[in-house]
Amino acid sequence: MSHHHHHNHSSHGHGDHGHDHDHDHTEGQVNEDADAAKILWKYVDFEGIRTLNESQSNSGAMIVEKTWPQRLEPEPVLTSDADEQLLMSIPFTGVVRLHEIMIRTSDDDTAPSSLKIYLNRNDLDFSSTSDLEPTQELHLSQLNDVQRIPVKRSSFGNTYCLTLFFDSNYGSGVTNIYWLAFKGEFMHLNREPVEILYEKAANPKDHAPVVGIKGMSTGLGL
C-alpha cells in the first residue's frame, strides 16, 4: 500500500524513483531473508512451552509457533489473565547460542515494558522469580513493529531453555504479545529431540527443516 502512495506522489522523475525504490526493496528483502534464516523456530520444543497467567490455554505456545511471514498477523495473541504479568518457559530441542529476542507487541498500554530472562530454568513460577536474580533484564518499547533486542551473548552461549518473565506493562490491566521468536545458532542435538522432530513432520512443509537437521547431526557424527 505504501509503495503505491509514494510512487504516485512522486510523479516527476518517475523512472529514477522507480529504480531507486526497487533497489531499496531488494536490499530490504535480502535483510529480511537473513533475519528469517537465523530464527531458531524449528529448534523450539513447542509442545514443552508452558505459560502462566495466560487467558486462553496454549496461546503462549501459539504466538511462538507463528512463523516469520506470520509475525504481523493479529491472531493468535497471548493475553494475560488475572493481572498484567506473564511467565513463559520455552525449551529448545537442543543447545543454542542465543543472540537476540524478537518480539511484537503494540503501541498501546497493553505492551509489556520489562522482560526478565532466566537461563535454563524450567521450574520457575511467579513466587520463585522474586527470589532469583535474572540472567538479564530487558526494557521493551511500545511498538507495533517487531523489536529486536540483543542479549549478552556470553551469558546465553549454552541455552536449552528460557524462562521469560514479563513483569510489567505500560499501564493496562492486561498484557498482549502477538509474536515471539529467538535468533541465534543451533549447536547440537540432545539425545531425544531427533525423534520429536520426526514426529512433528506431519506435513510436507516440515520435511525440509527435518532433512536439514538430519544432515547437520550427521556432520557432527551423531
Image (cartoon, grey):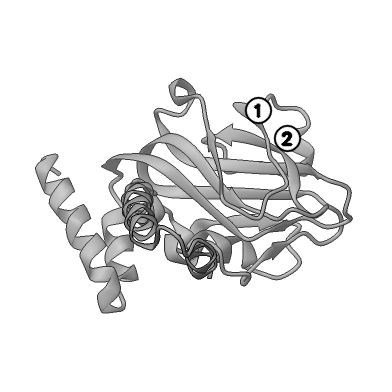
Which quarter of the rendered picture does the C terminus lie within? top left
Which residue sits at x=61%, y=27%?
136
**Of callouts 2 and 1, the N-terminal one:** 2
Image coords of residue 30 (percent x, y): 31, 50
In this rendering, position of residue 50 left or right of residue 167: left
Which residue sits at x=29%, y=69%?
206
Mark 1 nearby-residue class (10 Å; few <14, some 14–19, many ≥20) = some
Q: Secondary structure at mark 2?
A: helix
Does residue 196 lie above or below 125 as drawn? below
Q: Secondary structure at mark 1?
A: loop
Mark 2 nearby-residue class (10 Å; few <14, some 14–19, many ≥20) = some
User: Which residue is at the front of the view, 4 or 38?
Assistant: 4
User: Which residue is at the front of the view, 120 or 207?
Assistant: 207
Circle 2 residue: 129
Which residue sits at x=49%, y=42%?
161
Three-letter code, disc 1: Pro
Does residue 115 lie above or below 205 as drawn? above
Image coords of residue 1 (percent x, y): 53, 71
Does residue 55 lie above or below 135 as drawn? below
Which mark is in front, 2 or 1?
1
User: Which residue is at the front of the view, 193 or 80?
Assistant: 80
Image coords of residue 90 (percent x, y): 53, 49
In this rendering, position of residue 155 left or right of residue 25: right
Circle 1 residue: 134
Q: Residue furthest top?
A: 154
Number of the label disc, if any, that sits on residue 110: none
Which residue sits at x=11%, y=47%?
218
Three-letter code, disc 2: Thr
**CB under 8 Å between discs 2 and 1:** yes
In this rendering, position of residue 23 left or right of residue 10: left
